[in-house]
Image (spheres, helix red, strand yellow):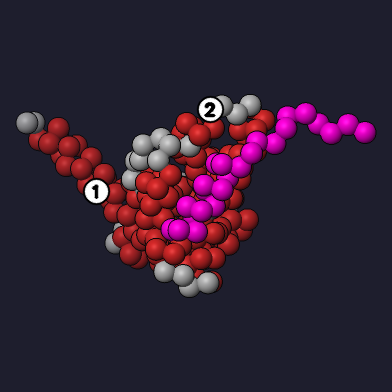
């Protein structure tokens, strides 16, 4: 390989290695720092072993680094929820609680800061949309016979019955064990799914 080409290849590898290290460092800081808004470029620079100038050249700003970190965290979190067959409430609740056991505290911490950092708000908004899509897919067999309006109302109720704040209430506030918490989730989900559908007609008067 010609010397010039070889040097360019080495430089590209070093650039990619720096990028990967910066992102992994930012991910670690997001996970361990109480307030994401407190993370600075100097923090990332120190822990990643690169200069602030290097970070800015690659990501443009602190928000650029955090956005890349949130993207990695999103992929990681998705991997924590085991795929389950549509319609299987037991498996779905078990997979959901598995995920919350791993990332619930971090999720709650992020929600507490959501309106302090627009970038975090966007990430959480996408997370809410993803969770709703999961509910629609997983419980589709139980919802297919409903009208559009009834389906939307049932999905909203399912969201409330599976939200991470419920996990916090059960596991952190009420200090229930994992088994009892799962049972509470199952009871609520089953309650939503077997409830008689509300009438589509609007009350007149």
Left or right side of 101 for 110: right
Residue 96 in the image: state x and y as whole percent: 42, 51
Vertical arrangement, residue 20 with respect to residue 106, above or below: above
Where residue 124 appears, x then y in whole percent? 53, 49
Residue shown at the point (39%, 63%) measured from the top left: 179
| Most foreground residue, 62 or 96 | 96
Sequence-first tag of 2 and 1: 1
- Does 19 appear in magenta? no
Q: Which residue is mark 2?
A: 144
Which segment is the magenta one? 182-205
CB of mark 2 within 8 Å of CB of mark 1? no
Residue, far right: 205
Q: Is residue 189 magenta?
A: yes
> Quadrant of residue 103 in the image?
bottom left
Quadrant containing the N terminus in the rendered view: top left
Indicate the secondary structure of the residue bearing disc 1: helix
Which residue is labeled 1 in the image?
17
Residue 145 appears left or right of 14: right
Residue at x 44%, y 64% (from the top left corner): 180
Locate the C terminus and report the quarter of the image it occupies. top right
- Is residue 174 left or right of 138 when viewed as pictured? right
**Nearer the observer, 45 or 161:** 161
The residue depicted at 52 percent of the width and 47 percent of the height is: 190
Residue in the picture at 61% in, 39% down: 154
């Amino acid at each position: 390989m010609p010397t010039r080409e070889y040097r360019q290849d080495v430089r590209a590898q070093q650039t990619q290695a720096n990028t990967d290290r910066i992102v992994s460092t930012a991910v670690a800081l997001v996970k361990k720092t109480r307030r994401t808004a407190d993370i600075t470029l100097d923090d990332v620079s120190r822990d990643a072993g690169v200069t602030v100038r290097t970070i800015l050249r690659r990501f443009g700003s602190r928000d650029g680094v955090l956005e890349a970190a949130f993207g990695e965290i999103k992929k990681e979190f998705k991997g924590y929820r085991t795929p389950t067959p549509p319609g299987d409430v037991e498996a779905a609740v078990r997979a959901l609680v598995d995920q919350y056991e791993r990332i619930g505290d971090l999720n709650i911490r992020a929600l507490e800061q959501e309106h302090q950092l627009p970038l975090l708000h966007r990430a959480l908004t996408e997370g809410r949309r993803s969770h709703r899509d999961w509910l629609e897919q997983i419980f589709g067999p139980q919802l297919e016979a409903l009208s559009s309006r009834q389906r939307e109302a049932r999905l909203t109720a399912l969201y409330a019955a599976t939200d991470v704040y419920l996990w916090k209430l059960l596991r952190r506030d009420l200090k229930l064990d994992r088994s009892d918490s799962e049972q509470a989730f199952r009871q609520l989900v089953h309650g939503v799914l077997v409830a008689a559908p509300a009438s589509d007609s609007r009350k007149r008067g």
